[in-house]
């Protein structure tokens, strides 16, 4: 399990990555490396999701985006 609190979990990679582990915590998740990030865990993080820098976010199941309010923000993703 990946856990982060009141902070930032950033994926800034230029190669594709699949994260099957569960992610929990209250911080923001960011995909900014220009590659594809696939989230497939039963995630419970409550922070927002930001996709930027020409990146792509793929969700593998209904809980992949955690429990945060609102839709992911795409800024030049």
Image (cartoon, rainbow, N blue to C red):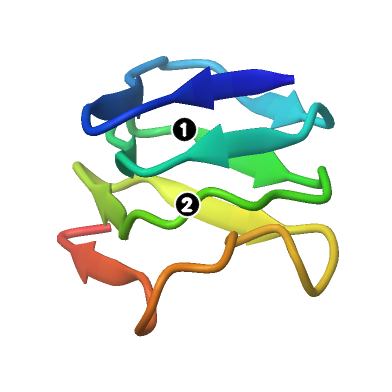
Q: Give percent across and percent down for residue 70.
A: 35, 84
Q: Secondary structure at mark 2?
A: strand
| Mark found first going from the N terminus, 1 or 2 | 1
State left or right for residue 26 relative to residue 18.
left
Residue at 38% from the left image edge and 79% from the top image edge: 69
Check disc 2: other Cα within 10 Å, few if <14, some if 14-19, many if 20+.
Answer: some
The residue sitting at 54% across, 16% down in the picture is 15
Q: Quadrant of residue 2?
A: top right
Q: Quadrant of the C terminus?
A: bottom left
- In-front residue for pair 60/26: 26
Q: Where on the picture, by quarter, is residue 39?
A: top right
Please state the total of marks drawn on the protein image: 2
Q: Is 57 above or below relative to 6? A: below
Measured from the top left, where is residue 35 in percent x and y? Answer: 47, 32
The front one of 41 and 31 is 41
Per the rendering, the mark at residue 35 is: 1
Residue 31, position as x, y percentages in the image: 36, 38
Residue 70 in the image: above or below residue 38? below
Horizontally, residue 30 falls left or right of residue 53, namely right
Q: Is the residue under label 2 in contact with that under label 1 (CB below 8 Å)?
A: yes
Q: What whole-number distance in Å separates the C-alpha atoms at marks 1 and 2? A: 6 Å
Q: Is residue 69 above or below residue 47?
A: below
Residue name at image x 64 percent, y 52 percent: 44
Residue 51: x %, y % from top left: 30, 53
Q: Viewer-proximal residue, 55 or 43?
A: 43
User: What's the mark number on residue 44?
Assistant: none
| Residue 38 position by quadrant | top right
Name the element at disc 1. loop
Residue tagged by mark 2?
Answer: 56
The N terminus lies in which quarter of the figure? top right
Q: Counting other residues with Cα less than 10 Å from the Cα at mark 1, is it few (<14), some (14-19), or many (20 or more)?
A: many
């Amino acid at each position: 399990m990946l856990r982060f609190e009141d902070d930032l979990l950033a994926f800034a990679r230029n190669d594709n990555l699949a994260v099957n582990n569960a992610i929990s915590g209250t911080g923001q998740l960011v995909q900014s490396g220009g590659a594809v990030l696939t989230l497939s865990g039963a995630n419970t993080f409550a922070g927002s999701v930001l996709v930027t820098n020409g990146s792509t976010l793929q969700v593998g199941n209904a809980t992949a985006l955690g429990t945060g309010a609102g839709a992911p923000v795409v800024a030049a993703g």
